[in-house]
Every structure is written in C-alpha cells, then in structure tokens.
Amino acid sequence: MIIDASNLILGRMASFAAKKALSGEEIIVINCEKAVITGRKNSILARYRLLMDIGQPTKGPFIPRRPDLLVRRVIRGMLPRKRARGREAYKKVKCYMEMPPEIKQDSVQTISSADINSRSTSKYVTVKELCRLIRK
C-alpha cells in the first residue's frame, strides 16, 4: 500500500499505517515532509525541543531531523517494536520525501479521514517546517 502524506494529519496517518503493517502489508509513505501536526506552532516546537534536551547526547532519546525519518519514528511509536511481531511490521514500513522512481503513480492512496482540509482547524505545522525549526 502506498500512502501520499500530503495534507494528512501525522498521528492519524501513522496509526492507519501501523495497523496495516501489523496486518502484514508493505507500507510506503511518500511526501512525508507535507504531513501536518495540528496545534499551535510554539507548543509543538517546545515539545520536540524538550525531547531533544532530555538525557545525554550519546544515549538518547534521538529525534530525527529529516522529515522521512521523523514520520517513520512516529509510526514506530505506534508499533509494539520490542516484540517480534512489531519488529517485523516495522521492517515493512518505508518512508520517502518524494516519489521514488520505482513506484508507480497510479497506485497511490490517501486517507480521507486524516485529511487536514476536512477539519475546521487552521493551526498546524508541516513536518518539513518542524524539522527545519528543531535543527536550530
């Protein structure tokens, strides 16, 4: 299954992808940098900066600063990754920032229940912008 993450709410898209991966499907997420996180920009940025300040630099927690790796980590958080079933499901998840050449365009799907345009909120941050801001 190929999911286009453009204008999709990250958490809803990630839970859908995690369920499909647990059921045994190969999941490919494209356009990861265009996914959105709802909420105020300052509170989202403060939450991620707090996660980066916790602990030691050599022991983690490690927050990826690339949009495709951040989306993959969010999906990992919704899998039982310490069990064999979760590890196998996590291996089936692949995330890309754009359309790779080996993927055919006609089989791309979107999740209508996770679309930000169907919501009444105007407060959100794209994953690309979040990754750009937490690099500083």
Image: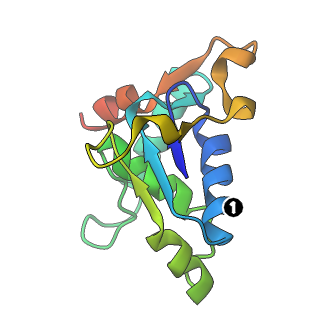
Residue 14 appears in the picture as rendered: yes
The quarter of the image holding the C terminus is top left
Give percent across and percent down for residue 76: 52, 63
Furthest-bottom residue in this view: 84
Left or right: 2 in relation to 16 = left
How many numbered tags mark residues here?
Answer: 1
| Secondary structure beneath label 1 | helix
Q: Residue visible at 52% across and 53% down?
A: 74
Q: Mark 1, residues whose alpha carbon is within 10 Å: few (<14), some, or many (≥20)?
A: some
Q: Residue visible at 56% across and 83% down?
A: 82
State the scheme by which the image is colored.
Answer: rainbow
Q: Is residue 39 above or below residue 61?
A: above
User: Closer to the camera, 121 or 8?
Assistant: 8
Q: Which residue is mark 1?
A: 19
Q: Residue visible at 68% across and 70% down?
A: 23
Give percent across and percent down for residue 17: 61, 54
Q: Residue visible at 41% across and 49% down?
A: 70
Give percent across and percent down for residue 40: 58, 21
Left or right: 62 in relation to 118 = left
Residue 83 appears in the picture as rendered: no
| Residue 109 occupies quadrant | top right
Say what amino acid the circle numbered 1 marks. Answer: Lys
User: Closer to the camera, 136 or 64?
Assistant: 64
Give percent across and percent down for residue 96: 34, 46
Left or right: 98 in relation to 90 = left
Q: Is residue 5 above or below residue 14?
A: above
